[in-house]
Amino acid sequence: MIIVLKPDSTAAEIGAVIARVQESGATPHPIYGIERTVVAVVGETRHVDREAFLKMPGVEKITSISAPYKLASRESHPDDTVIKLNGLRIGEREIVIMAGPCSVESRSQLLETAHAVKEAGAHILRGGAFKPRSSPYSFQGLGLKGLEILAEARELYGLYIITEVMTPQAVPLVAEYADILQIGARNMQNFGLLHAVGRVQRPVMLKRGMMSSMEELLMSAEYILAGGNYNVMLCERGIRTFEKYTRNTFDLNAVPVLKQLTHLPIIADPSHATGRWDAVPAMALAAVAAGADGLMIEVHPRPDEALSDGPQSLKPERFAETLRRVKRVAEAVDRTLSTVPAEALPLRSPAPADAHAPLA
Ligand code: PEP
Ligand code: MN
């Protein structure tokens, strides 16, 4: 349920409502909007007495949230969530571009790619240091060394970093290096991991599982929000169907439909969605036309030599050309590509203290 406060409610009145929700055994999640505050009440709500809340000063009305994903739903939070990374804002009119290799393979490979994607206009550098591979014999990533290389590229080129975290135990370490924590498709329902990233304040990009419905994706996001981390974005990366000519089937429907169901930013990943570089540019354009708030695109200087996902990686020149076209489509749908002011780039805030808290 949602307790809607009057537009002129005072901080003390809001505080009293929050305290009373806690006394009833439920969990309050206050959402401070531009015009008014609402308190989403989740968890154990059996002992919450609606009538008593209605009589409290500052309370206007009480409504129910019909969706099972209470905090992720638009009903609880009509305004779009905007994730702020120093100067970069994700979830507004400006579209953000995440690009880089599937895996960090070596220092030279990553720096070469970082330089190229920055020149082309990307804002966020991607690269896996811990790789979820279908085969235990495939390249598993460089681990800590990979994180260190990403951190170096970050400083050299002024790019934010997104990289995957695969286990709850690794969350504090990855949160030290990354600006955004990526939860991969294979881990979308790793609830221990979702709990762990819910307890840090680093933004999280949650990828849709290859066999997961939109509702399951939203329920997974709910775990992170319920843990207290509201900086969550979702990523459509294709789902498994009977089709064999593409690696996955890009569920473009998910972009406009998720935008209606949730306030969280939606990123599209045409690389994993198609599995083939020759289809990536067209699907990147389509995703922007459909309303995506950002793109994630795999780029490798020599895709033939890539240790993972070479067949779907764009060469830098093709990536640059794709972004030029993405810009034109963005303008056609009243959006622009983000331009981060240079002075806002250099450093993210240090990893928050609770990133180091022992895991329950
Ligand atoms: C990736 O981003 O390289 C990746 C492994 O993606 P997904 O989890 O969507 O397969
Ligand atoms: Mn990949």
Image: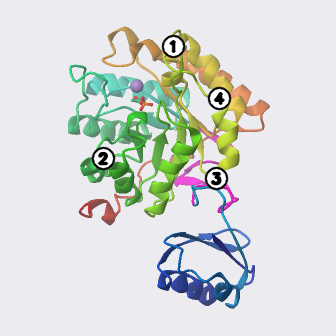
* Residue named by callout 1: 277
Determine whether the beta carbon of the residue marked 2 sits less than 8 angstroms from the nearest atom of ligand 1: no
The magenta segment is 71-96
Q: Which residue is mark 3?
A: 263
Question: Percent x, y for residue 203?
Answer: 46, 52
Pointer 2 or 3: first along the chain: 2
Disc 4 element: loop
Answer few, some or many: residues within 10 Å of disc 1's Cα (few below 14, many 20 plus, some between 14 and 19): many
| First of labels 1, 2 by sequence position | 2
Q: Nearer the viewer, mark 2 or mark 3?
A: 3
Mark 1: C-beta under 8 Å from nearest atom of ligand 2? no
Mark 4 highlights which residue? 252
Asked if disc 3 and disc 1 are in contact, CB closer than 8 Å, the reply is no
Tell me if the residue at label 3 has its CB under 8 Å from ligand 1.
no
| Viewer-closest of 36 and 333 | 36
x, y (%) of residue 256? 70, 38
Residue density around tag 4, few if under 14, some if 14–19, many if 20 or more, within 10 Å = many
Q: Which mark is residue 174?
A: 2
Say which label, 3 or 1, has the lower sequence index: 3
Question: Which amino acid is tagged 3?
Answer: His
Which part of the image, by quadrant, shows the N terminus? bottom right
The quarter of the image that holds ligand 1 is top left
Q: Is residue 270 magenta?
A: no
Which mark sits nearer the N-terminus, 4 or 2? Answer: 2
Image location of residue 214, percent across then percent down: 58, 40
